[in-house]
Image (tube, rainbow, N blue to C red):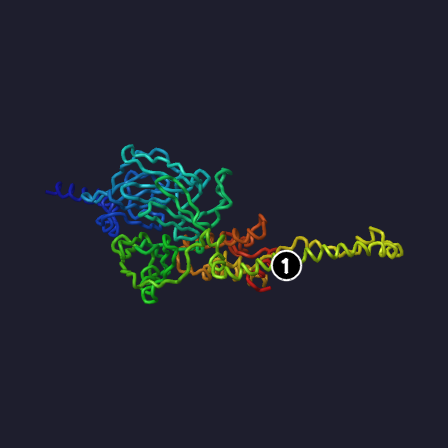
């Protein structure tokens, strides 16, 4: 009897950790029961469970989730591996035969119908722009050729990052990242990409530029029938190029779920099934929020400025005032004709008077050429090299958080004070977040400011710089370089 009890306890304690480790979070179990395609958003780097055959180190490199008609799949970032959820055993089974790894960290995984795709990611010292399709027969990823190479990577919490999957038209919409310091292949960078927004036709691999993206700081959490939902209650409708906003009461409920001051864990997984948002921070439970079309308020603000807007933005006015334009044009042509006739008459009469003026000109003392040139006002070096620009245009490039942070650091620098990371965390609203989130938010915002301001300065040195703290050499403090203080002041409207 004692021997049987011993073996029973050995089995329990021996397999208990494995069962707990591979247990599936409640939200993924619920997701596996749903039908059709669901776009899933994943946030942390650590897998919410363990996979026995996954190499050490890849369990905390992030992951992607795809739910389509074929089932529920998970993709550990950087591996190329594909695991399918087994509903009967509630376990993950590897279904691929991938060998190569390390090239696709922070890549985007998505599904259209029964097909599974992967786009972008970084590895081997570069950010790639490859579109890959999973072949379930061979268990490998095949590259789909595209007409343009746009380097792109997924950045958690949506900062400087946007993507939208239009399953109806079979298109993937992303905002371009432009050139990046990690790029080592010069022919794979495109300085024209910047923050423009592009649509990729998955079927034929054709990229199409839609226009200039107005907002690159969307913290996306779900795909509603009317567009992408972010944590601030904005709904971005790409197909119709419209922006909506939830009501204040519903936004309060949304932020009560997404921003919990007493929550020790960050968001793990979120998605929308029809008009219901599912979101969780832990493995045991999840929150839901129902959103209807009646909850949306149209802001009458386009998501992006179309190419046609830039070229033909005055066309409607031309059509409306076409008669006036025609009259003004006719008057201008008539004026040129009359002026030409007067010029011909004047020229004929002046020819007779030239001889009289010749004698007078002989009595006028000549001025040496060198003296005449010296009398001409010369431009100073500053006037020749002065950079003029419209501050309002520069301010449009900076998002609200970027403007607030730039202004805060500027005032401190004007007082010859350094800005600490704790002060920056308070300004950008991440003081209560984890250290990892704080570091990522600071890095993204400061990097974005320096990149945009660099368009003006054309200087390799960044606007915002840093130096190690005198009190803690492990920490940095930030300031605006003295040679750029006047420029920042003009951009902020202080001068």
Of 158 and 392, nearer the camera is 392
Q: Position of residue 435 (x, y in %)?
A: 41, 54
Q: Is residue 435 above or below residue 150?
A: below
Kindly identify the residue that appears in the image at 70 percent across and 53 percent down.
381
Of 78 and 340, nearer the camera is 340
Is residue 300 found left or right of 483 in the rendered image? left
- Corner quadrant of residue 256: bottom left
Q: Position of residue 246 (x, y in %)?
A: 34, 63
Quadrant of the frame with the C terminus: bottom right
Whether residue 59 can be seen here:
yes
Report which residue position mark 1 lands on.
335
At label 1, counting other C-alpha atoms closer than 10 Å, the crowd grade (few under 14, some 14-19, many 20 or more) is few
Kindly identify the residue that appears in the image at 48 percent across and 56 percent down.
315
Q: Is residue 400 above or below residue 41?
A: below
Kindly identify the residue that appears in the image at 53 percent across and 59 percent down.
325
Is residue 334 found left or right of 205 in the rendered image? right
Quadrant of the frame with the N terminus: top left
Whether residue 266 can be seen here:
no
Of 333 and 251, nearer the camera is 333
* Number of dots carrying numbers: 1
Q: Position of residue 483 (x, y in %)?
A: 62, 55
Is residue 390 found left or right of 339 in the rendered image? left
Of 22 and 399, nearer the camera is 399
Q: Residue furthest bottom?
A: 249
Q: Position of residue 126 (x, y in %)?
A: 46, 40
- Dot 1 falls on a residue whose secondary structure is helix
Q: Is residue 13 above or below residue 472?
A: above
Q: Residue furthest right?
A: 363
Q: Is residue 432 above or below residue 86?
A: below
């Amino acid at each position: 009897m004692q021997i049987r009890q011993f073996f029973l306890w050995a089995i329990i304690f021996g397999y208990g950790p494995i069962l707990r480790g591979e247990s599936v979070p409640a939200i993924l179990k619920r997701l596996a029961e749903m039908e059709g395609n669901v776009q899933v958003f994943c946030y942390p780097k650590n897998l919410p469970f363990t996979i026995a055959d996954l190499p050490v180190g890849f369990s905390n490199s992030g992951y992607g989730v795809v739910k389509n008609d074929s089932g529920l799949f998970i993709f550990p970032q950087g591996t190329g591996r594909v695991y399918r959820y087994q509903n009967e055993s509630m376990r993950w089974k590897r279904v691929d035969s991938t060998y190569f790894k390390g090239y696709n960290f922070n890549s985007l995984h998505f599904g259209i119908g029964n097909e599974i795709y992967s786009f972008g990611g970084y590895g081997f010292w570069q950010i790639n722009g490859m579109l890959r399709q999973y072949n379930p027969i061979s268990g490998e990823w095949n590259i789909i050729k595209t007409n343009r190479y746009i380097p792109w990577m997924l950045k958690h919490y949506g900062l400087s990052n946007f993507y939208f999957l239009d399953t109806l038209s079979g298109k993937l919409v992303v905002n371009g990242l432009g050139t990046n310091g990690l790029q080592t292949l010069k022919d794979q960078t495109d300085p024209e990409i910047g923050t423009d927004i592009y649509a990729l036709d998955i079927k034929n691999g054709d990229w199409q530029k839609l226009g200039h993206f107005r907002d690159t700081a969307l913290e996306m959490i779900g795909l509603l029938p009317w567009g992408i939902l972010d944590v601030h209650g904005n709904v971005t409708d790409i197909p119709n190029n419209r922006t909506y906003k939830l009501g204040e009461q519903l936004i309060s409920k949304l932020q009560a779920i997404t921003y919990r001051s007493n929550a020790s864990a960050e968001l793990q997984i979120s998605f929308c099934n029809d008009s219901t948002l599912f979101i969780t921070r832990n493995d045991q439970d999840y929150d839901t929020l129902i959103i209807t079309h009646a909850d949306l308020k149209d802001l009458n603000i386009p998501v992006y400025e179309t190419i046609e807007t830039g070229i033909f933005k005055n066309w409607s006015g031309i059509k409306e005032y076409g008669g006036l334009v025609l009259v003004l044009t006719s008057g201008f042509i008539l004026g040129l004709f009359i002026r030409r006739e007067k010029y011909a008459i004047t020229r004929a009469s002046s020819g007779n008077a030239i001889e009289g003026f010749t004698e007078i000109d002989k009595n006028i003392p000549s001025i040496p050429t060198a003296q005449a040139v010296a009398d001409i006002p010369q431009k100073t070096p500053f006037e020749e090299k002065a950079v003029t620009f419209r501050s309002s245009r520069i301010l449009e490039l900076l998002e609200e958080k970027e403007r607030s942070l730039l202004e805060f650091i500027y005032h401190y620098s004007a007082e010859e004070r350094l800005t600490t990371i704790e002060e920056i965390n308070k300004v950008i609203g991440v003081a209560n977040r984890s250290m990892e989130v704080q570091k990522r938010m600071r890095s993204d915002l400061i990097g974005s400011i320096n990149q945009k301001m660099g368009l003006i300065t054309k200087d390799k040195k960044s606007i915002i710089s840093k130096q190690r703290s005198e009190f803690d050499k492990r920490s940095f403090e930030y300031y605006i370089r003295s040679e750029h203080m006047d420029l920042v002041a003009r951009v902020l409207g202080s001068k």
